Amino acid sequence: MEWDKTSDQTDIHAVFAPIIRGLCINTAGYPWVVMYDSGLEKIPPAALTVDIGSALTDTGPLNEEAAAKIFREAYTAWEFDIAPAGVNAFVQPQTFKQEPSCVVLKSGDTVKACYWIDRNLDSAKQRMAEQDDSFLKESLPKDPSTNSSWISEFDTAQRVEVVRNKAVLVTGGIKKEEKNMGTELVRSLARSGALVFIADADLEQMQQLAEQINRVEKRTAVIALQVHEADEASVKGLFKTIAETTGGLDICISNGGLLNAKSVLEQSLKDFQAVTDVNYIGFFLMLKYGGLLFRRQHRTAPHWKTDIIQINSKLGLIGSENFGANAGSKFGGLGLVSSAAMELVEYNIKVNAICPGNFSDHSLWTDPEQGLFVRYFKSGKVPMKRACTGDDVARAMYYLIEQEYETGQAIPVTGGEVMLH
């Protein structure tokens, strides 16, 4: 039997891993890890083996809907043939049903890929290391017809649990020693039980932050990956790596941003384009490739809601002297948010933005003589009389994730500096 480990134009992992993860989510009603095994020597006996040949094409992209159909049919057959207790599970509320812990993809006699499945990354890694293909036993969701996180009466405990065990991507502005927006969001998500991918250009800084948080959390809570947000190949590769590591995502937070304070009369085109590339083009690429991944999960988990959140700025809501490049790119970002929200709602993807005011630890704000805090405080522009913090933005982020009936919105977190018009 040939074991095909090559990478080609079909992007097998980027397409099939989210479809497999979606199937797991749809069955149990909560997040799963689907991890690619690059070193499999033989097919585990209890693996769910799926022939994907009919979904592959010689040229062009994979047929995603055909792939999803193949997996739905293969899983149904597996339930009847391998785990017959699952057939009557939905009419037995207390029944535990068996799930496959290993999925092997074949095309004819050629093995194309293998994935290990479990509830969290560390246990999936252990299964892969031990080649442990024993079945997973899971209790059934109370309402298998929807498998949504929605319940009829709001429970405040939901807010605490809204990201637990979910896979989250946070891009941009992440540094180990600096207290900034990206770092604060990552720390908050890790404390709340999420598995967080952090992605930025400075890989060394992010690895140090990941190691620091993982020691505190005593688990794999943060994984550092490199990305150049304005480079399409880099962003596409980022989402492929995520698909190989966890099978997919539940939340994508685009936090990349470049600030350039200069008059439109003095700013060079090169500097203007640099701001536009990161703040606008970069967010477009996150929307595109994050949306594609979420759509693949949706094909087998149609009731599972996912989130794309842009950390925008008050400059997306109101212009500001000497910040024309930033305001233009941020206004454009909100146009993308509202347009994508209308388009992606078909796939249960919510798209929203958070528009923070001046961040308390940014040098533009904290300088004791020329800082914006001194100027804004004296002018009375901020009624709440303080700067924005990471916790302020985190609260808005949790609200948007928790709130299932909200999309296409821009939430101001400005201390009253920007109010309703």
Image (tube, rainbow, N blue to C red):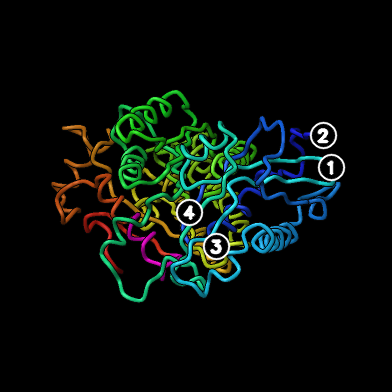
Element under disc 4: loop
Residue hosting label 4: 31
Tell me what residue is drawn at x 56 percent, y 31 percent.
129
Give the mark nearest the N terminus, 3 or 4.
3
Give the mark nearest the N terminus, 1 or 4.
4
Q: Which one is closest to the eye, mark 1 or mark 3?
A: 1
Q: Amino acid at mark 2?
A: Glu
Residue hosting label 1: 109
User: Viewed as shown, does residue 291 lie left or right of 110?
Assistant: left
User: Viewed as shown, does residue 16 lie left or right of 176?
Assistant: right
User: Viewed as shown, does residue 309 lie left or right of 299?
Assistant: left
Element under disc 1: loop
Give the mark nearest the N terminus, 1 or 2.
2
Q: Which one is closest to the eye, mark 2 or mark 4?
A: 2
- Asked if labels 4 and 2 touch by Cβ distance under 8 angstroms, the answer is no
Give the mark nearest the N terminus, 1 or 3.
3
- Asked if labels 2 and 1 touch by Cβ distance under 8 angstroms, the answer is yes
Residue hosting label 2: 2
Relative image position of residue 181 (x, y in whole percent): 33, 41
Cα distance between the residues tagged 1 and 2: 7 Å
The answer, for residue 281, to whether it is visible in the render is: no
Seen in the picture, residue 416 relative to 216 is either above or below; the reply is: below
Relative image position of residue 391 (x, y in whole percent): 25, 47
Splitting the image into 4 quarters, where does residue 115 fall? top right
Q: Which residues are magenta?
A: 397-408
Q: Amino acid at mark 3?
A: Asn
Residue 314's tag is none
- Asked if labels 4 and 1 touch by Cβ distance under 8 angstroms, the answer is no
Residue hosting label 3: 26
Element under disc 2: loop
The answer, for residue 78, to whether it is visible in the render is: yes
